[in-house]
Amino acid sequence: MKKDDFILVDGFKHIRHIQESYPENEMIKRSNSYFKFMNKRRSVRHFSNKPVPKEIIENIIKSASTAPSGANKQPWTFCIVESLKIKQQIRTAAEEEERKSYNNRMSDEWLDDLKHLGTDADKPFLEIAPYLIIVFKRPYEINSDGTKHQNYYVNESVGLACGFLISAIHNAGLVTLTHTPSPMRFLEKILDRPTNERAFLLLPVGYEAEKAYVPDIQRKSIDKIMNIY
Ligand code: IYR
């Protein structure tokens, strides 16, 4: 390493960072084509069972792990389920919770808000998709002496990692769905997770079905979501 490549801050090494940049016209083009690419992403509920190389899943998880996190604690674990037996267990337990939600727990207003999406308590994609990614948050770490060490901004950090994950899945040419079979404690039990992990989000991942349909919905326009002061 050259002399100027790092400095010490309170005795901690900080390495030189050089952000790759571009001429302004290039930046305009790049930001626009990234928007166009991201705008093609849809939550898809119709999956193919076509196998997906494990290397793609690994790369997707590595991309998710580049998200920023509170005090760089990276308070997340990604569990990949490919076993049909475990997928079936998850589907049975998720549908049980979902039936309770759709029948009793969700308000009429909520059910009404979901109508145009065509969702219900049946979750066949939990068995059909070649992989389920279950994201766990870690509110604290367990030290070797058994004491707890707090993590920070855990929901924000894991939410960001999930956003990175979803865009990596889209970039690979696969589809996913943010499934929230609430309450999700059954996932901790089925996957036998340590006591410091809580299920955060369940994402089936795979190719979309040959004939997949998504609801005809629009994104809010820029004037509705951006305020300039
Ligand atoms: N968790 C249920 C219900 C559901 C809730 C919302 I908010 C959605 O945007 C979609 C579905 C389910 O996954 O079906």
Image: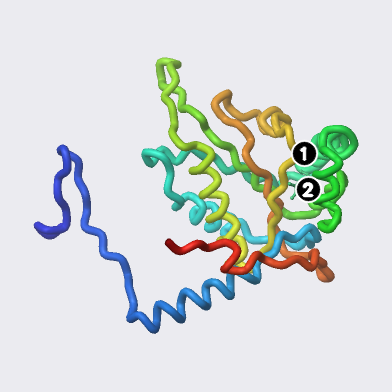
User: Does the image show residue 219?
Assistant: yes
Spatial separation of the CA atoms under disc 2 and disc 1? 7 Å
Residue at (55%, 46%) from the top-left corner?
159
Query: Regarding mark 1 in the picture, which secondary structure is present there?
Result: helix
Residue at (19%, 45%) from the top-left corner?
13
Q: Position of residue 35 (x, y in %)?
A: 55, 72
The residue identified by callout 1 is: 90
Q: Is residue 108 above or below residue 23?
A: above
Picture mark count: 2
Q: What's the residue type where badge 1 is placed?
A: Ile
Image marks 2 and 1: residues in contact by CB distance under 8 Å: yes
Q: Is residue 156 left or right of residue 85?
A: left
Q: Is residue 37 above or below residue 3?
A: below
For marks 2 and 1 on the same chain, the one whose residue lies earlier in the sequence = 1
**Where on the picture, by quarter, is residue 79?**
top right
Give the quadrant of the N terminus: bottom left
Q: Position of residue 117 (x, y in %)?
A: 81, 57
The residue identified by callout 2 is: 126
Residue found at the far left of this picture: 3
Q: Is residue 1 left or right of residue 37?
A: left
Q: Position of residue 94 (x, y in %)?
A: 79, 38
Q: Is residue 200 above or below residue 63?
A: above
